[in-house]
Structures are given as C-alpha cells and as structure tokens.
Image (cartoon, rainbow, N blue to C red):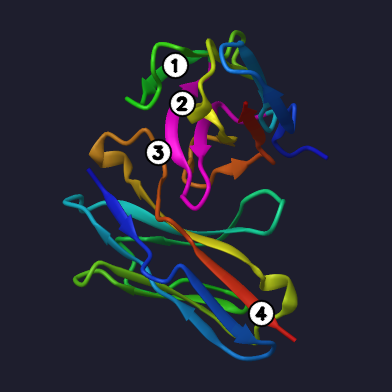
Amino acid sequence: DTGVSQDPRHKITKRGQNVTFRCDPISEHNRLYWYRQTLGQGPEFLTYFQNEAQLEKSRLLSDRFSAERPKGSFSTLEIQRTEQGDSAMYLCASSQEPGAQEQYFGPGTRLTVT
Amino acid sequence: AQTVTQSQPEMSVQEAETVTLSCTYDTSESNYYLFWYKQPPSRQMILVIRQEAYKQQNATENRFSVNFQKAAKSFSLKISDSQLGDTAMYFCAFMKGYSGGSNYKLTFGKGTLLTVNP
C-alpha cells in the first residue's frame, strides 16, 4: 500500500503529557498538510510543508504544537502539555506539484486526553 | 476568509434512488477549486469529485455529479443509483487557486451524514 500512513492510529494520554504523531506521505509528494477534526466538524487546517519548509501555520496551532518535516519525507506533529481540548482526530494529507489540488488523506490519529 | 456551509447535517436515501447534498460557499476569489470528499465510518477520507471554478461544465464521475452555480456560490452533489457503500460523511471543501497566492489548503464544511437504506 503506497497511500498516506499515520502512526499511531489511536492515542490515549493524560492531561499534561506530551504526544507525538507521525505521518508518512505518498513518496513522490512534496506537499504535506496537517488538519484537525473534532466531533461533528469538518477538518480544520493546522499547517503545511513544501518539502522540508513549513510555510504556513494556522492560529489554531498554539505554541504547544510543533510540526517538523526534517528531510522532506515523513512529518511529526508534537503536542506538549496536552489539554482535554486537544482531543480530536489529527489528519495528514499529501499532494504533489504541479496539479497540487488533489490531497490524499491518511487514516488519522485519534487522540483522547483524559 | 472563505467559508463553506452544508445545511443538511443528515440525510437518508433508499438504495438505487438519487440524492442531492447541498453546499454553499463564500469567497471573494475568482480562481478556486471545489471538492466533495467522502469519509466512510472509521475509514479515511477520499476524494469524490472536484470542480475548477473557471470551468462552466459540471464535473461528473460515474454516479456522482455536481451542480455548480458560480454566481449563486452553490455546489451541490448528486448521487445517482445510491449504493449501500455510499453511506458516509460527505464534506464539501474549498481551495483557493494559485493566482490567489494559494497554499492549497482546504476549507471544509461541517459535513452531511448520508445513510443509504436497503
């Protein structure tokens, strides 16, 4: 399977702990996106990378959140000092330029903060 | 900023019948793309159909077609010959085009849960 993969699929953590998620995009895709989806809502944009450069961050991405894509391949999203409001599905998507309109989504990481 | 509105939180349809999901959007951009994504229960989101704003012809993909009304900023999805596997959450999404300095991020509506009944 050469689609977008995410790990872990589920994460339960206690408030105040740090968590890190990983996303592996489709191998030839140079753009990578992170979205957050809460119950009953559509996904909301968090940040995106073109190759290894992080080019935009949403105001939703507080200073407790950090994302990296060190070699322009996989990406990590870390949340420090988790809060209950961070409970959500975190989705990763990738796309390729040119013709970058179509984004391919991974299965998501469901985070539950207790 | 762009907004996408899906006014139908839930819909149901009988197998083999036709159903239309509504979507409206608000933007001042002239160059953009519109999408319908499908998210089946506990499965990942997949693209159903896309429409370039500069194209007057409505997009069609097999049983899925759109009614794109640019002036009205309306973008509805019609599913013909509904199948049980069409049961899913459907999201309408907007993307600014390149000329608008786009980073190609998607702005989603809240979704419509479609249930196809046997």
Residue A68 visible (yes or no):
no
Same subunit, tags 2 and 4: no
Residue A24 visible (yes or no):
yes
* Residue depicted at x 51% and y 21%: A83
Numbered label attached to residue B104: 3
Q: Circle 2 — which element?
A: strand
* Residue depicted at x 66% and y 30%: A25
Q: Position of residue B94 (x, y in %)?
A: 37, 52
Label total for image: 4
Q: Chain of mark 3?
A: B
* Residue depicted at x 53% and y 47%: A39
* Residue depicted at x 32% and y 72%: B56
Same subunit, tags 2 and 1: yes
Residue depth check, mark 4 versus mark 3: number of the one nearer the observer = 4
Q: Circle 4 — which element?
A: strand
Q: Which residue is mark 4?
A: B116
* The C terminus of chain B lies in quadrant: bottom right
Numbered label attached to residue A35: none
Crowd band around label 3 with a 10 angstrom C-alpha radius: few (<14), some (14–19), many (20+): many
Residues at circles 2 and 3 in contact by the CB criterion of under 8 Å: yes
- Rounded to the nearest angstrom, the CA distance separating label 2 from label 1 is 6 Å
Q: Which residue is mark 1?
A: A54
Left-right relation of A4 to B109:
right
First reached walking from the N terminus: tag 4 or tag 3: 3
